[in-house]
Structures are given as C-alpha cells and as structure tokens.
Image (tube, rainbow, N blue to C red):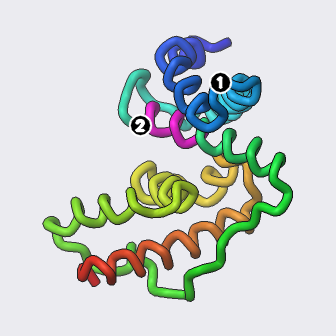
C-alpha cells in the first residue's frame, strides 16, 4: 500500500464505516461497501491531493456513498434512475453573482444524493467525465446521463428559489 493510501485509510476509515453503517445499519454489507470503496480509492489515488484535506474527505465520502448505493441497487433489481427533468440550460452556462453562490450550494444540497455528488465532482472537484466515470464506477454514457439530469434538477431548484 502506498504512503498516500495508508494516510487515506488511517484518516478516513471511521468516516467510511459511519457512512456505510448509515446505509446498512451495521450489516455485513457495510463492511463490503467500505472494502469496495477503498478499492475504488486505490484505483483513483492520483485524484487525491493532500491528506487530510477537504478535497480528499469529499472524494472519500462520495466514493463510499456510491459504493453503498451500488450494493443497494444490486439487492433491488427494480431500481431505476428517475427521468423527472426536461432538458434545461446548464447552470454552469449562466453567469452567477457572488451573492448567489451560497444559495446555489444550498440548492445542490437539496438534490438527490446521486445528482448532488456528480455535480460536486464535475464543478467543485473539476473532474472530467472520464474521471467521474472512474470514481463512481459507471459508464461514460451513464455519467453523461446523470450529469444532464442533475443539471436539469438543479436548474428547476434554482428557478423555485428565484435565482434564475
């Protein structure tokens, strides 16, 4: 294990278990999710900067939550992504005033976790679609679809808040 991987493990393993236990209530699936998450972290170790840091913590949280969702999805075959948003202009294409940034962050926080996570990876962590696909363990097409739906959901939320 690399030095950075060891630092990540020692710094965030309790956080990873806390997140997984929140999904599974202490079941064996929580340990499986943490193991899966750490494998993804190892595969994407070059995306991590300093440890500890807000960036590394955020990536660990997103990867762990995504692994938990993957396990849940496999146990629920009827799971399907919602297609509840029509095509809208991307929020990133809209000029945003400094005062709106806090309100936009709040709107992202109110979105479905999978939408909020993918928007954070794209716009806060500045990852490209290939990087997002790798971190979330999804196909490039699924990444583009989720991004499109997340942008549409955020646009709708911004309209409800009167920001757009």
Q: CA distance from mark 1 to mark 2?
A: 27 Å
Is disc 2 placed on a helix, strand or loop?
Answer: helix
Where 34 falls versus 157 (above or below)? Answer: above
Which is nearer the eye, 106 or 131?
A: 106
For the C terminus, give its image quadrant.
bottom left
23 relative position to 50: left or right: right
The residue beneath circle 2 is 55
Residue 20 belongs to the span the image colors magenta:
no
Where 126 falls versus 157 (above or below)? Answer: above
Q: Which residues are magenta?
A: 55-63
Q: Which of the numbered marks, if any, corresponds to residue 26?
A: 1
Which is nearer the eye, 143 or 154?
A: 154
Let me know if residue 39 appears in the view: yes
- Residue at point 61% right, 60% down? 129
12 relative position to 158: left or right: right
Across and down, in percent, residue 100 comes to 20, 69
Q: Quadrant of residue 54?
A: top left
Across and down, in percent, residue 160 comes to 32, 81
């Amino acid at each position: 294990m690399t030095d950075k991987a060891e630092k990540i493990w020692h710094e965030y393993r309790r956080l990873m278990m806390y997140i997984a236990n929140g999904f599974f209530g202490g079941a064996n699936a929580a340990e499986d999710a943490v193991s899966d998450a750490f494998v993804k972290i190892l595969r994407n170790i070059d995306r991590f900067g300093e440890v500890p840091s807000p960036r590394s913590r955020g990536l660990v949280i997103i990867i762990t939550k995504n692994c938990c969702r993957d396990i849940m999805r496999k146990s629920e075959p009827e799971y399907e992504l919602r297609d509840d948003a029509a095509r809208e202009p991307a929020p990133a294409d809209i000029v945003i005033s400094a005062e709106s940034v806090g309100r936009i962050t709040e709107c992202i926080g109110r979105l479905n976790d999978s939408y909020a996570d993918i928007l954070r990876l794209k716009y806060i962590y500045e990852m490209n679609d290939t990087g997002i696909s790798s971190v979330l363990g999804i196909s490039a097409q699924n990444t583009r679809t989720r991004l499109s739906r997340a942008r549409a959901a955020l646009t709708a939320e911004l309209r409800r808040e009167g920001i757009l």
